């Protein structure tokens, strides 16, 4: 009997110790006053430490919600370098963008990350419009806001784009010379993928999908139902059967371990009319600022980073940094990989800002 009790006790202990990261992070999110879902997120502002400040501003009468992170012992009378951070497709500021914003603030930068217009907690109707021009303007507008924030040295403004935010950041940096140093993590070229499919898997349906997007816009214009793409719910078995790491791990990250109520995969079908004619890697020769592009060595999205990097023929001090063993989604949360990326970013911005 004692043996059975001992075995049960050991099993219970193992179950307790092996509580999934998803449960821990979701519990932390529910308790977090800022609804941050990443590991080690700020829960309160403490004097002398990195602090977070929710802020709002407008883009053409659309209210944008953002978080500004300030370094430890922040003094508004002093001058600090700043970094604008653009979130992934379907992501929100409380996920990976917030994690990188907080980690860079720990290195002495004032950082800002905002929910894209029409997405997350920001305003804009219809919901979840996902047009490149809007996402690029989001980046410019973050620069507008943070440039006026007390303590920011506008001559030392950096840019970081993650996943889809990386593609839009490259495009924004081509014309916005306020950004003195440009970096991406796991860059995703949204337009190319929406047009050709991931790893060029949907060439045969390009015209069909453009027709469907055009019809969806006609329906919207007539006041009909808004049509969406990417709002299908998948079972665990269906997720496991997906052919790409990006999507398998993406469903896990966004749907379970780091889920946030404002985050969603879906976007308006009419957005495809704009997305499918967009390519973040065009005009890369216009980037003459220092450029750092970070990707996982095992990321199935690496071909997009590689393509854009090679086209950046005029970028100063450009560097491609691979995180050994990392997949695309693992650069969002895995502590060792995030640490490598943040340390590399810190050195890059310190050198170039």
Image: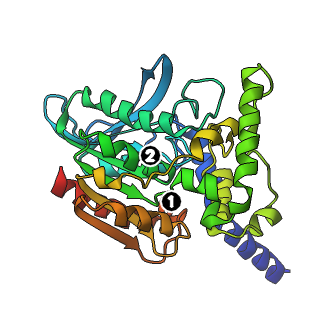
C-alpha gap between disc 1 and disc 2: 21 Å
Image mark for residue 168: 2
Image mark for residue 75: none
List the single residue furthest toward the front: 207
Q: Secondary structure at mark 2?
A: helix
Nearer to us of marks 1 and 2 is 2
The x and y percentages for residue 41 are 46, 47
Q: Secondary structure at mark 1?
A: helix
Instruction: Relative to 281, say whether 149 is above or below.
Output: above
The x and y percentages for residue 50 are 32, 42
In this rendering, the count of numbered labels is: 2
The colour scheme applied to this rendered structure is rainbow
The x and y percentages for residue 326 are 49, 72
Image mark for residue 333: 1
Instruction: Relative to 127, say whether 19 is above or below.
Output: below
List the single residue furthest toward the top: 61
List the single residue furthest toward the left: 78
- Residue 79: image quadrant is top left
At a point 48% along the width and 45% down the height, the residue shown is 87
Instruction: Relative to 339, say whether 91 is above or below.
Output: above
The x and y percentages for residue 345 are 30, 58
At a point 25% along the width and 26% down the height, the residue shown is 148
Q: Between residues 96 and 245, which one lies in front from this camera angle?
A: 245
In screen coordinates, is 86 left or right of 2? Answer: left
Question: Badges 1 and 2: C-beta atoms under 8 Å apart?
Answer: no
Quadrant of image for the N terminus = bottom right
- Residue 154: image quadrant is top left
Few, some or many residues within 10 Å of mark 1 (<14, 14–19, 20+): some
Few, some or many residues within 10 Å of mark 2 (<14, 14–19, 20+): many
């Amino acid at each position: 009997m004692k043996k059975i009790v001992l075995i049960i006790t050991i099993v219970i202990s193992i179950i307790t110790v092996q509580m999934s990261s998803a449960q821990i992070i979701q519990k932390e999110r529910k308790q977090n006053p800022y609804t941050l879902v990443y590991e080690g997120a700020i829960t309160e502002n403490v004097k002398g430490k990195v602090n977070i400040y929710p802020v709002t501003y407008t883009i053409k009468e659309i209210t944008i919600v953002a978080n500004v992170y300030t370094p430890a012992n922040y003094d508004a009378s002093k001058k600090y370098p700043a970094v604008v951070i653009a979130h992934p497709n379907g992501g929100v500021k409380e996920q990976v963008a917030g994690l990188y914003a907080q980690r860079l603030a720990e290195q002495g930068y004032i950082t800002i990350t905002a929910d894209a217009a029409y997405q997350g907690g920001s305003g804009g109707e219809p919901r979840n419009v996902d047009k490149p021009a809007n996402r690029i303007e989001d980046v410019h507008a973050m620069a507008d806001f943070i440039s006026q924030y007390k303590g920011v040295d506008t001559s030392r403004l950096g840019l970081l784009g993650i996943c889809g935010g990386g593609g839009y950041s490259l495009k924004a940096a081509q014309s916005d010379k306020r950004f003195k140093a440009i970096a991406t993590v796991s860059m995703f070229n949204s337009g190319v993928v929406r047009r050709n499919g991931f790893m060029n898997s949907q060439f045969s349906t390009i015209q069909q999908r453009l027709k469907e997007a055009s019809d969806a816009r006609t329906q919207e214009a007539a006041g009909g139902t808004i049509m969406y793409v990417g709002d299908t719910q998948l079972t665990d078995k269906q997720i496991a059967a997906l052919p790409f790491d990006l999507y398998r791990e993406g469903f896990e990250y966004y749907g379970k371990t780091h889920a946030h109520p404002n985050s969603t995969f879906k976007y308006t079908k009419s957005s495809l009319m704009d997305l499918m004619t967009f390519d973040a890697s065009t005009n890369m020769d216009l980037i003459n600022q220092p450029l750092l592009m970070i990707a996982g060595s095992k990321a199935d999205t690496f071909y997009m980073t590689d393509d854009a990097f090679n086209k950046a023929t005029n970028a100063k001090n450009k560097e491609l940094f691979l995180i050994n063993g990392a997949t695309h989604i693992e650069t969002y949360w895995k502590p060792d990989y995030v640490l490598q990326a943040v340390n590399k970013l810190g050195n890059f911005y310190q050198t170039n800002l």
